[in-house]
Amino acid sequence: MPSPAAGGPAERRSSAGADWLPRLGRGLTSRYSLIAAALLLPVALLFALGGWWSLQPAKFDVVANAESMLGAERADTVQGATTVAAAVQVAETLLRKPGGWLHNDRLPPGVLMDNMPAWEYGALTELRDSVRAMRNDFSRSQTQSIEHEALKNADAELSFDPNAWFLPSAEDEYRQGTAALRSYLQALVSGRDSTARFHARADNLGAYLAVVEKRLGSYGQRLTASVGDAELTGALTGAGFEPAAGAQVLERTAWNAVDDVFFEARGYTWALLHMMKALSVDFRKVLEDKNAEVSMQQIIRDLEQASMRKWSPVVLNGNGFGVLANHSLVLASYIARANAAVLDLRVLLQRG
């Protein structure tokens, strides 16, 4: 029986039957690609959103900030207005920056982030110190003076647990604390409340700087512990290489906690920078009388360097003169310089 002619019906059926395999493969590949894209797109969006939320907030001009809140005339004439307005702006930055307060987040991307929550805690630590100094020192003429009610409320609200997320949340408490700070600022400017005062004296500033000195010293120690080199730690902190009996010895920071310490210190220096700039305005006469303007400007310069933008996407933890830098040690060096200038300023305020 003769075979079918080439290109006949039998051959076309055979060719058509063989084509279904490539078509099926292309269909499955297209379907898997759509599924993969549907799964990867939300992940990419979360990473992008987390990256945006991780950016350090921009610095602000403390004088312009006070003028925008109170008007140029009142901001220039009311003692303490610049300092209190700076504290208000730091508090509002923590609440209004991209992502808001992330420290207590329970959903992604906030729950997956640790750098910005650590930064927030550092800034919050300085804000708490500043508000407590206003409550205990700046607003009181003597030890038996009555504390201002708004400052007492602000201190209590801002001391709330930063991890609380429900009934009440940390954000709710901090908003109330910020509102109390604004209330004190308005009372200070209006002049109608006899208990709302801001006393720019050398002893008040010295008491605040004593707290700052301890904070900077602690952050310097924790940052240098990222290396775990006793000799290097001693050189940067001014301590001896061999710890004395009973002295605290810091162990090397765990590799997964190096960035947390770094960003917490960065948050503290960011908030402290604005507070020192504001204090340099409200305590200008005191600083001039004590010949302490140079020390104050040195503190501000070092804090500017400590809080400048970090271009590396990760916190590097190199050692010695190796290939990689050590961002923790760079920050520790600026903090050590600022701490030395704070000590000089305190001495001048006491003896100048």
Image (cartoon, rainbow, N blue to C red):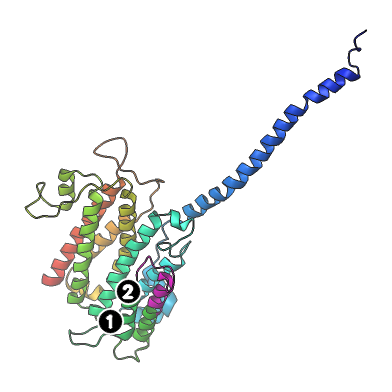
Residue flagged by tag 2: what amino acid is it?
Thr
Name the secondary structure under disc 1.
loop
As rendered, which of 279 and 176 lies closer to the eye?
176
Name the secondary structure under disc 2.
helix
Which image quarter: residue 344?
bottom left
112 relative to 208, above or below: above
Residue 184: give x, y in percent of width and height.
35, 82
Residue at left offset 36%, top offset 59%: 119
The N terminus - image quarter: top right
332 relative to 342, above or below: above
Report, in whole angstroms, how far the alpha carbon at label 1 lies from the one at label 2.
10 Å
Residue 305 has which mark?
A: none
Residue flagged by tag 1: what amino acid is it?
Phe
Residue lying farthest to the front in this orientation: 1
Residue 140: give x, y in percent of width and height.
23, 83
Contact between marks 1 and 2 (CB within 8 A): the answer is yes
